[in-house]
């Protein structure tokens, strides 16, 4: 069957339904999602921003080892979770904690990995959210595998796999898209192009017209969307999910957004970008944009906005209280979950650790001396 390449190429400019001031863009009113969906999305973004703020504070208080903030990318985070059904899967990166929270995972458990006290920190099967992936793009082939397996079983599951612009330069990105296209796996690859791979600007890592253009090389249709416009994201991503579910194979969506804060608390962003650049993107804030639209449309007032803020504060308090609990680590956990049946080497190492720890037990020296006599 002949493939119409033009239909696989993204729009020349990002799809946008609301301009930075919250006004509908001309001629596309029919594409605007229902008001209830937008209100739900705004509530999610308010919560996501408060979660980002709280998590950054917890780093400064020593309760988190590191936090890669998605401040400024809340529209992408919330939309990715909102377009999925209960039967679907989300495959996030280390920066997509707000997306996992929006999917319903307990925020304290979401931050378990970044606190450094447990693997992943949550049960991936409970909300169908895969563990946060720290290595770039390694979760993408896994996402394709889950989608391919679901298709073989005749399930309607769609997998939405998130990654950043830097991940598109990795080999795993290529392998995932190629496999997904050949086997028509129901995957939506959602690239959050926040303009920097840590400190490397996009222009130094890709010469493609857009990252969405990369799809055509694999036979995957691509689309480009304003990543700070929640209305446009819901429109584009829900369409991509629907096509993948209907058997049209994988889809690639690039959301153009901006990381307003540093890569992590260990990064000094002033070394590679200017204040003027940050200020220009602050004027495109996704929360302010949708807030302005919904107020002008008469579906958001101060009372409802206050309720959103109260909900966000309750989640922040829950997060804060959960992370402020001191956990006494059990050294034996290092050995418990490596294999279902421990190897002889692990058994030997566990015995060695237990013996070493027992030497620090109170009264051990006196007991040993008594035994010697």
Image (tube, helix red, strand yellow):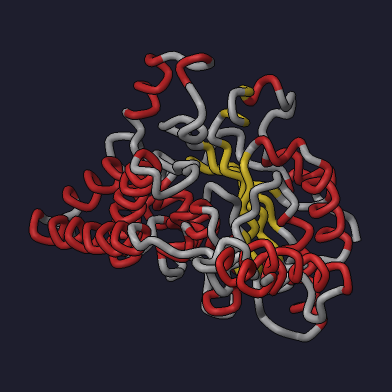
- Quadrant of the image occupied by residue 324: bottom left
Q: Nearer the viewer, residue 336 or 174?
A: 336
Residue pushed farthest right?
Answer: 1
Q: Is residue 77 left or right of residue 373?
A: left
Screen quadrant of the N terminus: bottom right
**Residue at the (49%, 35%) spot, across then down:** 264
Q: Position of residue 130 (x, y in %)?
A: 62, 66
Q: Quadrant of the C terminus?
A: bottom right
User: Residue at coordinates 38% horizontally, 61% vertically from top-left?
Assistant: 326
| Residue drawn 22% across the image and 44% down it | 292
Tag count: 0
- The quarter of the picture where residue 228 lies is top left
Q: Nearer the viewer, residue 292 or 45?
A: 45
Q: Could you tell me residue 19's position as x and y percent?
A: 35, 37
Q: Is 287 on the left-hand or right-hand side of 78?
A: left
Q: Is residue 347 above or below residue 23?
A: below
Q: What percent of the width, then of the height, locates residue 179?
A: 86, 58
Occupied quadrant, residue 270: top left
Residues 193 and 28: in front is 193
Q: Name the residue at the front extreme.
A: 373
Residue 198 in view (yes/no): yes
Mark yes or no: residue 27 visible: no
Q: Is residue 86 left or right of residue 221?
A: left
> Which residue sits at x=51%, y=33%?
263
């Amino acid at each position: 069957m002949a493939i119409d390449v033009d239909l696989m190429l993204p729009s020349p400019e990002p799809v946008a339904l609301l301009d930075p001031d919250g006004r509908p863009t001309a001629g596309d009113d029919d594409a605007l999602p229902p008001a209830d969906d937008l209100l739900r999305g705004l509530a999610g973004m308010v919560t996501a921003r408060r979660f980002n703020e709280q998590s950054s504070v917890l780093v400064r208080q020593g309760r988190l080892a590191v936090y890669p903030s998605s401040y400024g990318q809340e529209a992408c985070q919330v939309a990715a979770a909102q377009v999925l059904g209960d039967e679907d899967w989300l495959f996030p990166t280390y920066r997509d904690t707000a997306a996992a929270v929006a999917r319903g995972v307990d925020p304290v458990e979401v931050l378990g990995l970044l606190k450094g006290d447990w693997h992943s920190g949550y049960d991936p099967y409970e909300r169908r959210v895969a563990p946060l992936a720290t290595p770039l793009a390694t979760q993408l082939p896994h996402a394709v595998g889950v989608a391919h397996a679901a298709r073989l079983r005749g399930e309607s599951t769609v997998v939405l796999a998130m990654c950043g612009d830097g991940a598109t330069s990795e080999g795993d990105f290529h392998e995932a898209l190629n496999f997904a296209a050949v086997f028509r796996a129901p995957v939506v690859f959602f690239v959050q192009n926040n303009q920097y791979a840590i400190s490397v600007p996009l222009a130094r890592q890709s010469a493609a017209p857009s990252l969405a253009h990369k799809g055509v090389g694999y036979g995957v249709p691509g689309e480009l969307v304003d990543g700070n416009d929640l209305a446009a994201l819901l429109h584009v991503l829900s369409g991509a999910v629907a096509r993948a579910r209907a058997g049209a194979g994988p889809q690639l969506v690039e959301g153009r957004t901006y990381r307003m804060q540093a890569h992590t608390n260990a990064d000094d962003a002033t070394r590679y970008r200017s204040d003027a650049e940050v200020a220009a993107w602050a004027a495109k804030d996704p929360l302010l944009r949708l807030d302005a639209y919904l107020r002008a449309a008469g579906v958001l007032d101060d009372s409802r906005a206050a309720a959103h803020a109260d909900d966000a504060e309750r989640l922040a308090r829950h997060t804060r209280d959960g992370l402020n609990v001191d956990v006494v680590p059990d050294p034996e956990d290092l050995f418990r979950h490596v294999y279902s049946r421990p190897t002889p080497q692990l058994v030997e190492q566990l015995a060695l650790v237990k013996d070493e720890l027992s030497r620090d037990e109170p009264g051990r020296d006196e007991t040993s001396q008594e035994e010697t006599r």
